[in-house]
Image (spheres, rainbow, N blue to C red):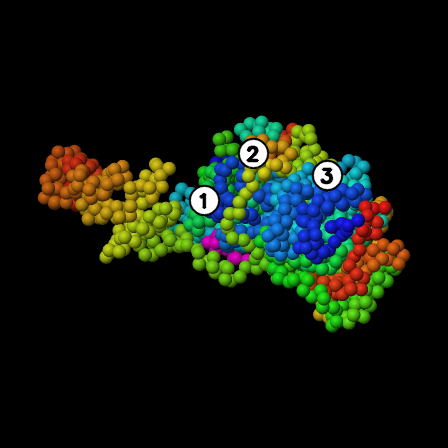
Amino acid sequence: MKTLEEVFETWEAVIGLEIHAELTTLETKMFCGCKLEFGAAPNTHTCPVCLGLPGALPVPNRAAIESIVLAGLATNCDIEKHSMFYRKNYMYPDMAKNFQTTQGPIAFCMRGHLDLDVDGRGAAERYRLDALAPGERDGNITRTEDGYVAHVGITRIHMEEDAGKMVHLGGGEGRIAGATQSLVDYNRAGTPLIELVTEPDLRTPEEARLFMQKLRQIYLAIGISDCSMEEGSLRCDGNVSLRRRGTTAFGTKTELKNMNSFKNLHDGLAYEICRQAEVLEEGGVIYQETRHWDPSAKRTIVMRVKETADDYRLFPEPDLAPYDLTDEFIEGVRAKLPELPDQKAARYAADFGLTAYDARHLVDHRTTADFFDECMALAVAEKGGSKFAKPLANLIINDVTAWLNAHEDTALADTPLTAARALALVKLIASEAISSKQGKEVFATMMDEDAEPAAIVEARGMKQVSDAGAIEAVVDEVIAANPDEVARYREGNTKVIGFFVGQCMKAMRGQGNPKIINELLAKKLG
Amino acid sequence: MATPFGSMSVRELQAGLAAKEFSAAEVARGTFERIEAADGVVHSFLETTEKLALDAASRIDGAIAEGRLAEMGPLAGVPVGYKDNLNLTGTHTTCASNMLRDYVSPYTATCVERTLRAGALPIGKLNMDEFAFGGSTETSAFGPTRNPWDTERVPGGSSGGSAAAVAAGLVPVSLGSDTGGSIRQPGSFCGLVGVKPTYGVVSRYGVVAFGSSLDQVGPFARSVEDAALTLNALAGRDELDCTSQPSDVDFTANLAEGVRGMRIGIVPAFLEAAGLAPEVKAKAQEAALALEKMGAELVEVELPHAQAAMSAYYVLGPCEAFSNLARFDSVRYGYCDPGHKDLGSQYEASRARGFGPEARRRIMLGSYLLSAGVYDRYYYPAQQVRTLITRDYAAAYESVDCILTPVAPRTAFKLGEIGDPTEMYLGDMFTISINIAGNGGMSVPVGLGADTGLPVGVQLIAPPFKDANMFRAAAALETVYGPAPVAPDYADGKVGA
Amino acid sequence: MTQHLSEADVRGIAEYTRIGLTAEEVVAMTADLNAIIDSLAPITEFDLDGVEPTFHPIGDLSNVMRDDTVRGSFAQAVALENAPKQENGSFLIPSILGEGGDR
């Protein structure tokens, strides 16, 4: 099979996503007062409504409607004031009523978009990006210095309800195929679910991954879901088709399921694109089918062939009054809209002079962004404090993130790190009291021993030596001891300077001021 | 022989309780004895609820002992029967279907709950057409109910058990449900007051759904006042039903006002309708003239789109029923055909054997009418026709306070007389447009037909949420025709011919 | 009578609604449904251009919602009390895909 890069020489991938998010932060289900709780004993969070008992009627949860409107506002959607719920009729045992209550042609949220910053290695997936100059546009993308921005349309976000859960018995690994019996638990049935459907605007697996990642950040920022891909509260299906470069008609698409991590989303789509290319290049046809990504086998397998379009007998749900949202309702929701990741990043750039890259990485996670805000609030309280923004950002993006990645089960709030300590550490480095290398040691010690940075510096005798006289003596010694390297430097191999800096640092047990060492070396070698 | 409790009015029962002529427990026990003795041929009850009734009676009797009868609610000590599509915790709710033969309700419908809170003694569950599909109570999986006026004849339907139980003097009040005429038509066949309130007056929570945008629960009684008292207990917003609305009307308030100054609409096209029996037409005209004589003004009104109501109904009803009945799938409850190794064959066998022919027809019809391409030909136009019918009524109400029409085109027919489903559907020709538009409508007994000697009713129709208007006119008619009698063979404690 | 539905159509509807009909029942059902659909003709005989549908006969009622507060649920035994088959607190059903495997 060809690589993605080879496939893209000939083919353009057209990708659309359908992303379901359970509104896990609510207290109760969509249409009844049963408590939302993951992992409870089976069928203990059920009632006449979510069990679909004869005679039961649904009543929508106001907070769920507020949540979806919030999601729409956060993704640049138009909020449709007038909409209705519909019944989507099909019989399946995990759906108690044998119809799903969902929305019809008009959803609460229509016509939104997200802009994706694609850079680094991910940008390389885009076919012939180099043909564009920074600022130049091509279709829905705009070239930037280090990649491009992709404008991805959102068709709609609609409100619906989740189904129950099934356990399949007698088949391999709990799979439905080969199972002789199944158990049905309706605890999850009726969980409020919002489904976002994108336009087919995505062209690379990386764009799809970034879209999902960005949407997750937004949903977390607005607090409507815990967005756990592992537990299934955030789920993504991908529709993918290929067409020859230069053509505009859509090819036959397949629907890809089970992409329950960002990596699986990327790798599943990448595989499916390559698989389709191979089929097409061998003269085969793509069938409209649902395929399942198997991450261990690294391939997609057929789940269901769609011979005819599904006919769900959709009709307006007579048991639910229509919606005619008032301006007051919508503005009330808008007032709850927090600062979104993009807005935060823009503020970091404007107020603190951070680069776009730094700003974006800070807002990648709500916890790191919140921590940065906390640090900056402390810093700005002092005069000239905003000059610490860049070193604080570096500390958080590099050291703090690395530490958190290495300690997956620990929340930032439960660590010895406080905003005051982070600021103190950054100040020690900025005032040249310790070197940045020493700073890393102080950070590690602080996290291990729960001590103040100044106390660590004191206890370990970690003082940065900035006395030019003392440093000059060391520099002279090092130059005298390494005549060969001196000769190479003078022959034009200036990279050797690193060797000299290292030797000086070693002689000073890491306490020499690297800036002064560099200056003196340059003077004396030059 | 003493008057059976089921033949008394609400007022008579409460006066007797207050005067300690009898206790609520005696009312309950007496009612069950009478059902035991008199319901064999009529077959109105599918289940009786002795324990629930005696528990309720003992609370009432406790209150009477403490002189607090008045606090126990407007239906205190009144035996009430419930159509078997109304959930009541611990009772079977079968909808007269094999599908739900063994189903025991784990919850109670709001309308039932409200009668209990009003002090009613729950007597049991009443026979009906399977899932309320029908107009004769012949499609019950547990055998038909017979009309106490002539046990060779049907009581009407689908709420035939609820009507027959009141007509036979087994209970003074019962609840039925009406999707296209299922309270009013049996009301007419059994000579009772039968009320289908405006859609939204009574909560549908716990009422097994047939046509969700058409269904409405209401009372059967032998007097307008008993019906009004019962509706008082039932009416009002329920947070468990999104389509229910507040009601602060006392339906008994203007019963004594008379009709002087009221404008009563007459629909000439209805009186000329093909298939309308002369004796029924004559009764409708007679009732109209009676109202005029009492000071009402008769005004001719037109409902030009009412002729399409029948076909709109046979689109909308099956479409909603198809979806509402999808939940009967042998997984969580209901009939499960044994021995299947795969779910598909279990589904197909359970639904084929659990549902009777009429239920199967309507489910399949609804599924077809909602399918791609067909939806735009029938379902969508039917909802547009609903708009036109609603406008027709709104226009009529500009000149009238209430409309008088026949209820059913004829009096009760014999069991087995009508076999063709489309002919059966014609029985709803005067009642259906009211469900389509959501208005209130009620049948009021106006004596016996000249030709058949069987009960005939007229239908009074009121603007949305002005149900009090039709009660007022109904009470005036009652001054002429008197409250409905118990069927002769069951009057004065008799137990049938 | 117009032939709106063929027996094959009726078999398709039966399959969709999961009602297993015998061959004779399909014949009878086809006749019944065609007769009923015939009687629906009046619906197609009005000029409905520009007429808004009334999906909900509830006047201006809209935006009916409840607060996000817990109302309580059934005990497991109550949830399962009408279950034809149950196991380990769950509803038990036979193989979804059947012996044929993937559908």
Cβ atoms at labels 2 and 1 below 8 Å apart: no
Residue at numbered disc 3? B98
Residue A342, compared with residue A482, is above or below; it is below
Q: Chain of mark 3?
A: B
Q: Chain of mark 1?
A: A
Element carrying mark 1: loop
Bounds of the magenta segment: A70-82
Residue at numbered disc 1? A226
For the residue marked with disc 3, what is the amino acid? Asn
For the residue marked with disc 2, what is the amino acid? Gly
Label 1 vs label 3: CA separation? 45 Å
For the residue marked with disc 1, what is the amino acid? Asp
Q: Residue at x 81, y 51 (%)?
A: B491
Element carrying mark 3: helix
Tell me where residue C49 sits by quadrant: bottom right
Q: Position of residue A331 (x, y in %)?
A: 48, 60
Front of the two marks 2 and 1: 2
Please check whether the numbered discs 2 and 1 fall on a single chain.
Answer: no
Q: Chain of mark 2?
A: C
Residue C89, numbered circle? 2
Tell me if B433 is positioned left or right of A441 in this view: right
